[in-house]
Image (spheres, rainbow, N blue to C red):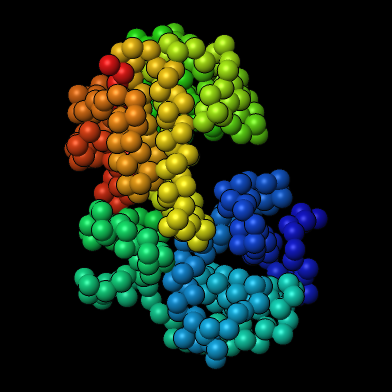
Amino acid sequence: MQPDLGITQRIAPIAPARAAAFHILHRVQTTAAHSDDLLHTPAIHALSAEDRNLVTALVLGVLRWQLYLDGVLRPMLQRPDAEQHPAAQLALRLGLFQLLFMDRIPAHAALNESVELARANGAAHAAGMVNALLRRALRERPDPAASKRATLAVALTPAEQAHPDWLLQRWRSHLGHAAARRIAGYDQAEPPATALFEPDPALPQIDDGSRLVAELTAAAKPGARRILDCCAAPGGKTAVLAARHPHAEIVASDNNPKRLDGLRKRMDRNPATAHVKTLLADMTAAPDDPLLRSDFDLILCDAPCSGTGTLARNPEIRHRLRESDFARQAERQRAILLGVADLLAPGGRLVYSTCSLEPEENEDVVGAICAATGLRPVPPHALLSQLSSVQAGAAGLLEQAVQGDSLRTVPGLQPCDGFVAVVLRKV
């Protein structure tokens, strides 16, 4: 018996993986749900391993390439500016993605089941249109790889076409044209396995950018007695801090009860992190708790942010983000930093980091906090030599990530998510 995967009512046979992918994409498009959460539900775990892999490939692939797919389809429509039925639009994207990017999927399966997905989800009137457009696409079949090879340096690559134009323009402005193109290319594939650090079975499997922030924080204050991770969930960086400072008192706080509960369970399962104390706290509201004494030697503030450095891992961000979001995020980040700065002991270190590539959330926030608190940046060069488990040959990549008083990883330049980290000291 197949698990109930949601909205799809089967009229003709539809493979469970395609039905599940359609349902997840519908949820991502119509709610605030995240693809990563939806790909790890009991219904998806009930599928076969082969189907689970296909669901993941379809969902993340369509989200990564959605803007490019829409650009291919738009000229084929009789009325390109007319609003499509959501089910027909999703069916077209799913079908076209399989035809263009998944050579092992039989074309007839991608085409026929896309038609049935539209028919089964309230767009029976558009089934003929879905069939005709996908058949035309199959005949004409634009090749993204060939297009990329033939593209002039001044034209947009397919990967760039899969990003909002306003976001590309921002990256070109403050990172340069070459970096923007490399970021766009990196965002369109599954993130690689660890390439900066040696695998460590004692640590959680997290992206190298996240681990770099955690390792930099751990190295910022050797012998720290009290450590605060103030935006800690889901706890990957907390676990690294616990491993590098096994004798320190570590407090991990978050303002989301559900995420904090998940962090607490994660810490309790591992003897190396069982001593971590967890605390529900909103650092923008000056929480009053005995654990939050003003004597922390080391504080990590990996602040909530826009996440533009993680589009390979979280592709739906590009479809939800608006340029006005950066100012809102920066206001919240400044409030969190002002709250935790008072908890730092004299001579202590505070590491501020985001997985954003945007200056409003990084340089501008750090500048405002230094002006308001008297905290001063610590150049990261000396700390890099103290990092644990750096792979042979990766030291150069880390040195390239140093920009002034900041450590910045850029997807495509470094093989990891984009992070910015700044070490601040209390005089």
Image label count: 0
> Which of the image's four quarters has the N terminus?
bottom right
Question: In the rendering, at what x and y percent does residue 155 appear?
Answer: 26, 74
Residue at the spot 42% in from the left edge and 49% down from the top edge: 327
Q: Is residue 225 visible?
A: yes
Question: In the rendering, at what x and y percent does residue 102 appear?
Answer: 48, 67
Q: Going by the picture, which residue comes out furthest to the bottom?
A: 78
For this rendering, which residue is in front, 302 or 335? 335
Within the image, what quadrant is residue 244 found in?
Answer: top left
Q: Is residue 46 left or right of residue 396?
A: right
Q: Is residue 379 left or right of residue 14?
A: left
Q: Is residue 302 left or right of residue 212?
A: right
Q: Is residue 49 visible?
A: no
Q: Is residue 38 above or below residue 352?
A: below
For this rendering, which residue is in front, 304 or 140? 304
Q: Is residue 63 above or below residue 229?
A: below
> Which of the image's four quarters has the C terminus?
top left
Residue at the spot 30% in from the left edge and 30% down from the top edge: 370
Residue at the spot 67% in from the left edge and 84% down from the top edge: 126
Q: Going by the picture, which residue comes out furthest to the front?
A: 372
Residue at the spot 70% in from the left edge and 69% down from the top edge: 14
Question: In the rendering, at what x and y percent does residue 271 appear?
Answer: 55, 15
Question: In the rendering, at what x and y percent does residue 375 appear?
Answer: 30, 24
